[in-house]
Amino acid sequence: MMRLRSINPRLVRALPAAVALLVLAYFGYHALHGKYGFFAYSRLVDEHAQLSAEAERLMAERRALEAQVSLMRPDRLDADWLDEEARRSLGYLHPQDVVVIER
């Protein structure tokens, strides 16, 4: 078994610094690449921005659908709108309608 006195004294003095450097490298790596590291945080920020934009788009679509549904309520039914929707969904035309075909 090797005694501590037979090891080079400079190596013994450098050992705590080497261990500290390894510990610092370990925690530094995980601070950047770990599950809760900097890169994971930046991915979460990007995903949050995308999901917020998607949520805003869906809320606008919902408001538009709610506006259409409010036109269908019996107490607020618009006859012109109902006629237009019926013709569009059934594909019927009135004899006095003008048809514009888009290419």
Image (cartoon, helix red, strand yellow):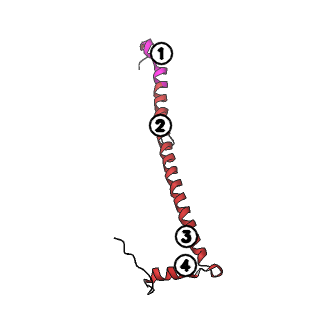
The residue identified by callout 3 is: 65
The residue identified by callout 4 is: 81
- Nearer the viewer's eye, disc 2 or disc 1? 2
Q: Secondary structure at mark 4?
A: helix
Identify the magenta region.
7-20
Amino acid under label 2?
Leu
Q: Secondary structure at mark 1?
A: helix
Q: Residues within 10 Å of mark 1 (few under 14, many from 20)?
A: few
Evaluate whether residue 46 shows in this view.
yes
Give coordinates of residue 41: x percent, y percent. Answer: 51, 43
- Among all residues in the image, which is located at the extreme bottom? 95
38 or 78, which lies in front?
A: 78
Image quadrant where one finds the N terminus = top left
Asked if the stretch drawn in magenta spans residue 29, the answer is: no
The residue identified by callout 2 is: 32
Q: Secondary structure at mark 3?
A: helix
